Image (cartoon, rainbow, N blue to C red):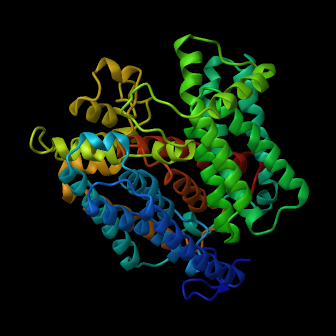
Amino acid sequence: MPVMVQDPRYAEPAVEYGLLGGEHVRRGQKLFLIGCGALVLASIYLAANADVDDLTHLYQGLVIFALAFLPGLLWAKSGGSRFPVFEPLMLLCASAYAIPLLNGHQQLMYYAPEIQTQAGWAVILYQICAIATYQFTTGMPGRSDFWTQPILSRKVEHFITYGLVGSALYMAVSTFTTWIPYEFNSILRAVFFGIGILCIFIGMQQWGRGELNPTERTVMVCSLIPILVIQTIGLLLIGSITMMGIAFVGYLSGGKRIPWAPLIVAFLIVAVLHNGKSAMRMKYWENEYPAPTLTELPAFFSEWVEFGLQPPHSDRSDQREASSSRLLLERGSLMHILCLVIDSSPDRQDFLNGETYGYVLPQLIPRLFWPEKPRSHVATYRLGVYYGLQTEEGTETTTIAFGMLAEAYANFGMWGAMLLGVFWGLVFKKLQILSRYSPMFSMAGLLMILLTAWSLNSELTMAAWVSSLFQAVIVVLGVPMLIRLVFGS
């Protein structure tokens, strides 16, 4: 339960939602010890199985891996806030940079060892600046209604799991029928996407705290599984992986316990699907097969699993085989993109000196008022064309994952990487402090849930990240305000 604390700015004791105390501290300390042990074992395994030609890359990879887990370990040791926005952002450095460097990601072979070394230092400096800024940033909790007053009654929280049912029903109807008029579908998609994120995070946090009864847990599972299934029909796994990440962070932040069995099962399933993804895309995309109907889903996924269980292979003889789980871990690599940028700038391509950040503020202007507003991925396309990865025409059909660290380096070099770390450490720590007394259904609480979810989007550039977050904020904060206006508080 939230802790009652006396604060001199409040006439009554304030509810400190940020650090939950009590049992959460004890569980958090246990989680901290488990995490430390897991980090040591994982580091030993990675060191023993590392595929590197330069020992410097081994040490850099292990340091990046350890720094990626450090904020999460400190979060657990302190009892953990309900809104771990900074910790997932840092954790993704393990899959995006550490593991590809240690495993000798196949695309790193195109870059000289000194380029890989420089990329490793860029990541480490980014992490150190972010973690140090986060640890030393202080402040006072927010006082205004935005931070302290619920926009809806806390009774709504007891029905949040059933909101996921509506999200699942919308996805099924919009995917398998033509009942929803086209002109309304984009609006409803945004609304139910926002509702789905809130329901998953809040519901799983309640589950972690032990507040859901068996019926509510069944509703959560029976609603979440169809959402994950429908999101993979297009043969893109990133949406489902993000949703599972939100569910995991919600459960972990609520109960300070790791759901080992569901986590292992989910990882194995995604690994198999990832291994069979290329074969399925070749059949359904290149041969222009229609997407499966509702009744064809069992056969569709049976075929996908059959492809996924086959040994991975490559048409190129110089590419070594890898297990499906290893391929999945390398799927999130951004290290080769960072090496590309470092290899090109500033020797062959000048630094952009903040050009891509100039696209951020225009994304906050609704397209209704600016029909010619640049596309949300305009910075991504600019980088792709600038570094020769695609043509202007290619940006119409393909979006390349650059990530914010490579973007920062492309603009300002090593200073850009360090300043990006300072930015995230400062912003996220300030927001966590300001939301210390924020109820879940306050404007600030809903905003923090979205930020927690968006911290998992490591592949976006800053403009695309801000654009997608802004759209979600409009929907997620607008819907409760509309409910309150119609039904009262």
In the visual, does 160 lie left or right of 11?
A: right
Residue at left offset 50%, top offset 77%: 74
The image shows residue 316, relative to residue 289, as above or below, that is below
Nearest the viewer among 261 and 177 is 261
The location of residue 362, given as percent across then percent down, is: 34, 38
The location of residue 67, given as percent across then percent down, is: 40, 68
Residue at left offset 30%, top offset 68%: 129
The image shows residue 213, relative to residue 320, as above or below, that is below
Quarter holding residue 429: bottom left
The answer, for residue 148, to whether it is visible in the render is yes
Residue at left offset 44%, top offset 35%: 366
The location of residue 283, given as percent across then percent down, is: 58, 16
Instruction: Give the quadrant of the C terminus.
Output: bottom right
Quarter holding residue 436: bottom right
Residue at the front extreme, as displayed: 317
Nearest the viewer among 237 and 461 is 237
Mark count: 0
